[in-house]
């Protein structure tokens, strides 16, 4: 089993829709959970991170962590064409490790 | 505030050659990590440098080596290139007091023919 599993999509939604992106992970020792956005041919950009369980909101974006089920989510409200990108979930660092472990990424297209 | 910069942006090499990629961290950051991102995959951790030492290494062969300079900039060297090394190589920088916040550069796209 891979450490982080993420449905690669692609996911296509109409403008204004609510988008739900999800990942599962296997190592319960990790405490930090990140979401990165990566535009085509660019480096990943940190959107937000959550420590331990709970929700975190930043504008139209909400990150959610459920440690009991090892499930992390990113919700995008009122999606815009500019949100079209690949979204990568990542876990770590922690438990004696300095690395980030990424999912494969979900490619999102928001259609005007 | 300058972000993470990487050079070159693109590179084409042939099998068996050697390559050196360069990274300058975000201003004030002293920790540099390198990742490899194959097409359609998430980034995979190669190694991290802190205080000019390799602090942690991912599951990559010894053909991948690195260096960190006193000004915190870093190099990634790959020897004996093979086709499977074709990927986007990403550098990320962070503070030791804030290791979960890693800022990525634009990457170097390497094509091995």
Image (tube, helix red, strand yellow):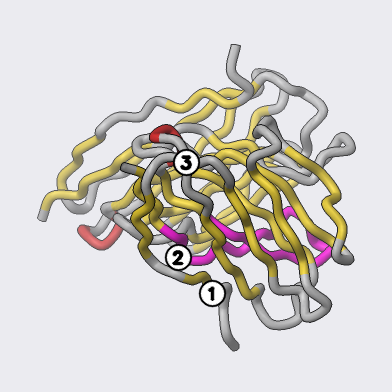
Label 1 CA crowd tier, 10 Å (few <14, some 14–19, many 20+): many
Pick whichever of labels 2 and 3 is earlier in the sequence. Answer: 3
Give me the residue at 44% from left, 69% from top.
B8
Q: Nearer the viewer, residue A94 or A56?
A: A94
Pick whichever of labels 2 and 1 is earlier in the sequence. Answer: 1
The image quadrant that residue A31 belongs to is top right
Residue furthest front in the image: B16
Q: Are marks 1 and 3 on the same chain?
A: yes
Report whether A49 appears left or right of A81.
right
Give the labeled residue for mark 1: B5
Q: Chain of mark 3?
A: B
Q: Are marks 2 and 1 on the same chain?
A: yes
Q: Nearer the viewer, residue B34 or A53?
A: B34
Give the labeled residue for mark 2: B106
Q: Which residues are magenta?
A: B90-108
Numbered disc 3: secondary structure: loop
Numbered disc 1: secondary structure: strand
For the residues labelled 2 and 1, say whether their Cβ atoms are less than 8 Å apart. yes
Q: Nearer the viewer, residue A21 or A103?
A: A103
Which tag is nearer the camera, tag 1 or tag 3? 3
As drawn, the label of residue A29 is none
Report whether B8 appears left or right of A81.
right
Is residue A100 highlighted in magenta? Answer: no
Give me the residue at 39% from left, 25% from top.
A7
Q: Is residue B59 above or below residue B103?
A: above
Q: Chain of mark 1?
A: B
- Quadrant where the N terminus of chain B is found in the figure: bottom right
Q: Are marks 2 and 3 on the same chain?
A: yes
């Amino acid at each position: 089993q891979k450490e982080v599993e993420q449905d690669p999509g692609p996911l296509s939604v109409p403008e204004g829709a609510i988008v739900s992106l999800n990942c599962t992970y296997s190592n319960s020792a990790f405490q930090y959970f990140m979401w990165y956005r990566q535009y085509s041919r660019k480096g990943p950009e940190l959107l937000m991170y959550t420590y331990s369980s709970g929700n975190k909101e930043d504008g139209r974006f909400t990150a959610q962590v459920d440690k009991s089920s090892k499930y992390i989510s990113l919700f995008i409200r009122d999606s815009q064409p500019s949100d079209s990108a690949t979204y990568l979930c990542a876990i770590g660092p922690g438990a004696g490790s300095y690395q980030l472990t990424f999912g494969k990424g979900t490619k999102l297209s928001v259609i005007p | 505030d300058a972000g993470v910069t990487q050079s070159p942006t693109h590179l084409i090499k042939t099998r068996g050659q050697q390559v050196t990629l360069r990274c300058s961290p975000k201003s004030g950051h002293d920790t540099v990590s390198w990742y490899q991102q194959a097409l359609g995959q998430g980034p995979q951790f190669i190694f991290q440098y802190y205080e000019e030492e390799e602090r942690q290494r991912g599951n990559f062969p010894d053909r991948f080596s690195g260096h960190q300079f006193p000004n915190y900039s870093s190099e990634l060297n790959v020897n004996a290139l093979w086709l499977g090394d074709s990927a986007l190589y990403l550098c990320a920088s962070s503070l030791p007091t804030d290791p979960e916040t890693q800022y990525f550069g634009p990457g170097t796209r390497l094509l091995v023919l």
